[in-house]
Amino acid sequence: MQETNLYTSTIPPMMKTLGALSKLLDKVSAHSETKATERRPGAVYAEALLNDRLVFDQFPFAAQIRIACDNAKGGAARLAEVEIPTFEDTEKTAEELSARINKTIAFLKTIKPEQVIGKESIKISLPYWNGKVLTGFEYATEYLMPNFYFHVVTAYSILRKNGIEIGKSDYIGGLPLKDL
């Protein structure tokens, strides 16, 4: 049985969810090709999907992916007390967004459990918190993970709204089921 701690409740779940998000991007590409016409190639359809949003004042799909990645790498780095890697926000295709996810997962893999375990009491602040702080535990449970999942589910919902055939299993990914 795996021990629950600040590492196991943040880094592995974010890696798993980013992997599922990458598979959703594969479905964007495949779906776009089925909609392609001579006048509107699949790339045009895919671009429209990447720029679509649920409502006018929310970020578009591509930004939801970027923000989920930024939450994952920033959160992991803050909890491990290491420098946050910088990624440019220049992705314009599903393939480029998938590459960003892969870079994020690669960074998360560099964070070792011992860098995060026991950091429940560290103080974490973000620039827009106006000098206020959260403990590492509060940051992970009340900000990082809810915010991360918010952007992932928003990206998922944009795809559903556009008729891409995905379901809950695409969002959750595989489960580590065991025999009784």
Image (tube, helix red, strand yellow):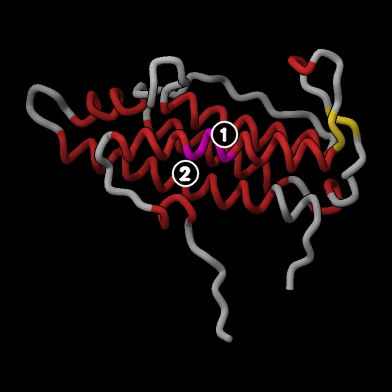
x 62%, y 34%: residue: 147
Q: Is residue 99 left or right of residue 131?
A: left
Span colored in magenta:
149-153
| Quarter of the figure with the N terminus | bottom right
Residue 171 x %, y %:
45, 50
Residue at horizontal 62 percent and vertical 44 percent from the top: 106
Residue at which label 2 appears: 21
Mark 2: amino acid: Leu
Return the residue at label 1. 68
* Image position, residue 162 (x, y; %): 27, 34
| Residue 46 locus on image (x, y percent) | 28, 29
Residue type, label 1: Ala
Q: Looking at this view, is 139 or 84 the one in front? A: 139
The location of residue 81, given as percent across then percent down, is 85, 35
Is the residue marked by circle 1 packed among few (<14), some (14-19), or many (20+) residues within 10 Å?
A: many
76 lies above or below 23 = above
Q: Residue at x 60, y 24 (%)?
A: 87
Count residues near mark 2 (Cα–Cα under 10 Å), then give few for <14, some for 14-19, many for 20+.
many
Whether residue 56 is situated above or below residue 156 in the rendered picture: above
